[in-house]
Image: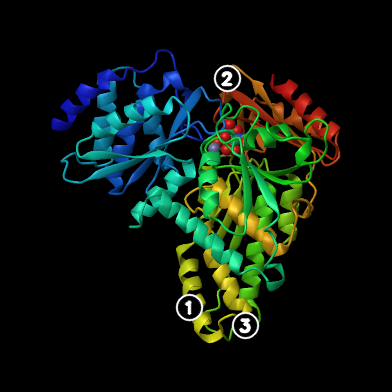
Amino acid sequence: ENQQSLLLQSIPRFPPPKGVKLSYGTAGFRADASLLESTMFRVGILAALRSLKTGSVIGLMITASHNQVSDNGVKVADPSGGMLTQNWEPFADDIANAPDPHSLLQLIIEFAKKEEIGFEGRQPAEVLLGRDTRPSGEALLDAAKQGITSVVGAIATDMGVVTTPQLHWMVRARNRGMETSESSYFHQLSSSFRCLMDLKPEERKNNGDDDKLVVDGADGVGGEKLQQFKKTLTGLCIEVRNQGDGMLNEGVGADYVQKEKVAPRGFGPADVGLRCASLDGDADRLVYFSVTSNENNQIELVDGDKILSLFALFIKEQLSILNEGEGEKENGSYQAHLGVVQTAYANGASTDYLKEMGLEVVLTLTGVKYLHEKAAEFDIGIYFEANGHGTILFSEAFLSWLEATHKTLLSTSEGSAKQKAASRLLAVSQLINQAVGDALSGVLLVEVILQYMGWSVHRWNELYHDLPSRQLKVKVVDRSAVVTTNAETVAVRPIGIQEAINAEIAKYPRGRCFIRPSGTEDVVRVYAEATTQDAADALASSVARLVD
Ligand code: NG1
Ligand code: ZN
């Protein structure tokens, strides 16, 4: 009763906007910031309930990532640091759209009963809150806090302005009994980076000092953090542009660079040939690029598929060093199951390349939660979306084997190739954010691998040649009219549309094309690939006309 009266006091203070239907989607709730106060409050309640249910600390991140600055959004991080369990998404949708205080209270009571969540206030509940640099973030944070504290015994801990991956990392760290501060996050990144730098081949030891990386911070939180963090890194020279003085995500950031295939604001002819990287607005996406000519800000784009390929190459090499000459005789040998996960948006040339490397490649639905889930099935699972969101997951079983093996190697053959390979893999597992894709840890891993290989950004980009591609979006009245199957590569609704798409594809050599409803915008996306840019463009526009 205590709980009910507490909720009844606070709920009426956050009435939902009229005539708006919200959906948790692939990246939480997103909308114009002015519509989101009641959603924040309600997601605050959900996060507190999730904490009660799991007996662990939960995260709540306020961001709209690469979307325009006037938008905002919210997503919940589960105890592992990953995305909110999909089983709770329908409840998120229901409470966000409950029209009045009474129906909201009813939904909460019923759900708590179904999930067997007790409100005795005996069990502590805690939610870590983070937000990006959007000006609307502060007021929305307050609404979220009020939601959290209207659940008996729940406390809200504000981590301030952080990147999305920092917040996810903190949740994961807290639930493993580790320190949660920003400085412990940076410390873990810089010490594992240092370890990998020290393990470069002898002949590469002096590389890198005079070789600058220029980073586009998307005028968001990632640029700010990197500017602060880079001072603690040695052996790497980073210049950060778009640190937050300009308009967030306007002509800058990983999403813009990857989709438009041009240099972001603040980059130009003076940068031709330099190694550059672009973060998105909340720093969970990363792409590389290099300005190629003075005209039209043209770039060589090194996207998520190529970051994935670089990581896969490096890890495969370390694994094969570790397993060299390892027969059935030696006890404890472990054939690690390495796999990579992509979506239908992965460039066809990248998938071919990875398969030629002998890797197991799995396709999933678009959206990090799906890739993450699949990657977790491997001993080492690497996932990336072409847009630059991805990470590497190590299974607990493999990590304990690796730690034990490394210990043995240190005592029997310190300094051997095998010991170093084991040490590198352990450092990668520390450096890479295992909660979620993280542009800051991603940059460090890319940089140290490039130095290890002695590669320029251009040499890296030459791993394979992207097939020309085009992405379009078509505004539609009802995007749910499009229904897909086979990891979104085949449209089963509207009836007959796939046959029409196939007829278009057949006109182009190596043509590939699919449509799917966006999970974050009111559009149907069209993706096309072919052997020339003109052909990819033509295929995309003719299929877009079929959708329209
Ligand atoms: P939608 O709007 O469902 O296509 C976009 C990205 C996803 C993912 C989510 C979440 C593309 C084609 N789609 O989803 O990959 O990153 O946003 O941010 O890039
Ligand atoms: Zn993002």
Check disc 2 and report its element: helix, strand or loop.
Answer: loop
Q: Mark 1 packing: few (<14 Cα in 10 Å), some, or many (20+)?
A: some
3 or 1: tag closer to the N-terminus? 3
Which image quarter: residue 266?
top right
* Disc assigned to residue 478: 2
Q: CA distance from mark 3 to mark 1?
A: 20 Å
Q: Position of residue 385 (x, y in %)?
A: 62, 44
Q: Nearer the viewer, mark 2 or mark 3?
A: 3
What is the residue that sits farthest to the left in this orientation? 1
Which image quarter: residue 8?
top left
Q: Is mark 3 within 8 Å of ligand 1?
A: no
Q: In the figure, is residue 60 to the left or right of 188?
A: left
Task: Tell me which residue sits at (56%, 72%) in the image.
Answer: 422
State ligand 2's quadrant: top right
Q: In the figure, is residue 25 to the left or right of 490?
A: left
Task: Tell me which residue sits at (26%, 22%) in the image.
Answer: 11
Check disc 1 and report its element: helix, strand or loop.
Answer: helix
Residue 77 appears in the figure: yes
Task: Tell me which residue sits at (61%, 48%) in the image.
Answer: 384
* Disc assigned to residue 334: none
Closer to the camera, 128 or 345?
A: 128
Which residue, given by chain and number where applicable, does mark 3 sit on?
Answer: 327
On screen, 88 above or below 321? above
Residue 360 appears in the figure: no
Q: Are marks 3 and 1 in contact (CB under 8 Å)?
A: no
Closer to the camera, 189 or 237?
A: 237
**Tag 2: amino acid:** Asp
Which residue, given by chain and number where applicable, does mark 1 sit on?
Answer: 407
**Tag 1: amino acid:** Lys
On screen, 160 above or below 482? below
Q: Nearer the viewer, mark 3 or mark 1?
A: 1
